Amino acid sequence: MDSIGQRIKNARKNASLTQLELAEKTKLSRSYIGDIEKDRYNPSVSTLELIAAATGVPASKLLSTSGQTPTPPRGVRIPILGKVVAGIPLEAITDIDGWEEISPKMAASGEYFALRIKGLSMEPKLHEGDIVIVKRQSDVESGDTAIILVDSEDATVKQIKKTKEGIMLIGLNIDVYPPHFYTNREIADLPVQIIGKVVESRHTW
């Protein structure tokens, strides 16, 4: 008996689509489609409907085989944001680069969004194109990996180290991004703002 992931993979192949092509048609990330096909995530009904429309296979056939009672899959979709702006609610941001899914339990614990890694500053842990799942919050603990806005520019992903005098932003690849320290005065004046905490990463193969 095929799993949902295997049925989705079969539907994609029968439609002569690569994972990347299916991702472009559905606005889901390629890494997430790969995870669905490997049954790492249980896709929501809305995600199944997107895949069904793209592959031409009824969602009911993706959900269950003949004779089975369909069980609505669980999952909460969150946006992959193309840009993060301090102070703007997630629902007001229209620059969306696709969708990821998190568990209902995770979704109930706060406000989440996803970002695509740009650049090489967090290698080898995070590679360009990887997706990080972020819990929106204005502060994190020293040692956490966070999303930071410096002088209202594009969001950057860095490890945080706190001191009484300020904070250090640390890129794991110091050849690309040497540690950068901001004083408490600079934090207030630039400003340097923590947008959220990275809680999970999803690798793009």
Image: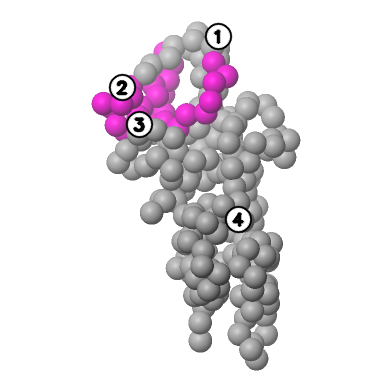
How crowded pointer 1 is (Cα within 10 Å; few <14, some 14-19, many 20+) is rated as few
- Side of 37 relative to 105 (left or right): left
The residue to which callout 4 is attached is 25
The residue to which callout 1 is attached is 189
| Residue at the outermost right position | 92
Q: Residue at x 52, y 40 (%)?
A: 115
- Mark-to-mark CA distance, 4 and 1: 43 Å
- Mark-to-mark CA distance, 2 and 4: 39 Å
The residue to which callout 3 is attached is 121
Q: Position of residue 56 (x, y in %)?
A: 65, 70
How crowded pointer 2 is (Cα within 10 Å; few <14, some 14-19, many 20+) is rated as few
Examine the structure image and report whether residue 152 is included in the region drawn in magenta: yes
- Mark-to-mark CA distance, 1 and 2: 22 Å
Residue type for callout 1: Asp
The residue to which callout 2 is attached is 178
Q: Which mark is residue 180?
A: none
Q: Are marks 3 and 2 in contact (CB under 8 Å)?
A: no
Residue stretch rendered in magenta on the structure: 151-179
Q: Are marks 1 and 2 in contact (CB under 8 Å)?
A: no
The C terminus sits in image quarter:
bottom left
Q: Secondary structure at mark 2?
A: loop
Marks 3 and 2, the one that precedes in the sequence: 3
- Side of 3 relative to 71 (left or right): left
- Mark-to-mark CA distance, 3 and 2: 9 Å
Q: Secondary structure at mark 1?
A: helix
Marks 1 and 2, the one that precedes in the sequence: 2
Q: Residue at x 65, y 36 (%)?
A: 95
Residue type for callout 3: Ser
Query: Which of 119/43 is in front?
Result: 119
- Mark-to-mark CA distance, 4 and 3: 30 Å
How crowded pointer 3 is (Cα within 10 Å; few <14, some 14-19, many 20+) is rated as many
